[in-house]
Amino acid sequence: MEARLRAGGGVLLGKNTTWEFAHGGPSWDAFAPPARNPWNTDHHPAGSSSGSAAAVAAGLAATTIGSDTGGSIRLPAAVCGLSGLKATYGRVSRKGVLPNCFSHDHVGPLAWTTEDVALTMQVIAGHDPGDPGSADVPVPDYRAALNGSCAGLTLGVPWRWLDEAKSSDSVRAAFAAALEALKGLGATVVDIELPSIELYSDSKKTIAMSELFSIHEKTLRTAPELFGDSLRYRIQCGALIRSEDYVQAMRMRSALTANMQAMFARVDAIVLPTAEPAGKLEPTPHSWLFKHASLTTPFNSTGHPALSVCMGFAANGLPLSLQIAGRAFDEATVMRIGDAYEKATPWRDRRPAIAKALEAA
């Protein structure tokens, strides 16, 4: 990854604060205090790629790299008002990335605009024999796909998922406006039915907890005090999962992926909100990660590419976000939709006060 970025002309500035091992957080007992949301520092920047999103939103970097096992690129991008892409599983090398869950980990860029995400993807995408999960698939010209139009594209909306996630009225209103904007750009929007997000969540958590425990088992058994409370709590769960549960979760994942593949034979992309606006940055029960319904996790389970882009702002000034998912290895269409939406809406004209101050300095 570093070699590709340097070869592409990138200037590497440093490392950003994330949740502990991309899973334990927000934590105040880890190596560094949690990152804050540049739109309002009393609020969180989500996780696990917290600092990656905060750095771009604050104007400290043009683009950053994050990892995504259940939403950890898209959620920080969403609550910090950015564009963030979880590329297709295997599209971007994970060599050098500390693993969270081997079978669900993805890598991708965050930036202020989808065009900048596309430019970064052009540099980092491609086969890497150093990553056993890397796919040897040709990389298209991503920027050339950004034609400012959604003409001829059919977009599916899984309304049931919004109900299951208990999407707020303000998120639904912004999403309805986003759908109208996409229609104005030439897209056809249709209702679709997908399995319950609980099924994706159950299979992902069973698999992820097993794999996370396998990664950290030795240290957990010999020096558990080295972990923060949040991460230690979540790792321990993996010790209770039976091998037959893991196998059945993998079988469920395969069935869910096949179902999603069949849906992408009918639609070019799936659109839905990414998440609710950022809440206050404060300690939360470690168990909350296992309890909330996630609109991002399904695309980790299936491996399809998914992009978050800013969808406006809540009454308190915090960003809202639109999520766009597409066919395997078709990041070009996903970014085409995100870029066209950004250029047709005014949301990129608004920056956090801290970013404006840095620009003026």
Image (cartoon, helix red, strand yellow):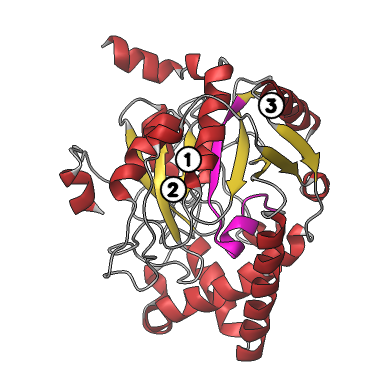
Tag 3, which secondary structure? helix
Q: Mark 2 points at which residue?
A: 49
Residue 103: horizontal and vertical position, in percent? 49, 71
Q: Mark 3 points at which residue?
A: 178
| Number of numbered callouts drawn | 3
* Alpha carbon distance from label 2 to label 1: 10 Å
Q: Which of marks 1 and 3 is nearer the N terminus?
A: 1
Crowding near the residue tagged with mark 1, few <14, some 14–19, many ≥20 C-alpha atoms within 10 Å: many
Residue type (three-letter) at the residue carrying disc 3 = Ala
Instruction: Tell me if residue 268 comes above or below residue 256 in the rendering.
Output: above
| Residue at x 45% of width, y 27% of height | 38
- Nearest-to-viewer mark from 2 and 1: 1
The answer to whether any part of residue 127 appears in the image is: yes
Looking at the image, do the residues carrying marks 2 and 1 touch, with CB atoms under 8 Å apart? Answer: yes
Question: Residue at 32% of width from left, 69% of height from top?
Answer: 131
Q: How far from the left and from the top, in percent, is residue 63?
A: 34, 36
Q: Give the range drawn in magenta.
A: 294-311
In terms of sequence position, does the residue under pointer 2 or pointer 1 come before the other?
2
Identity of the amino acid at label 2? Ser
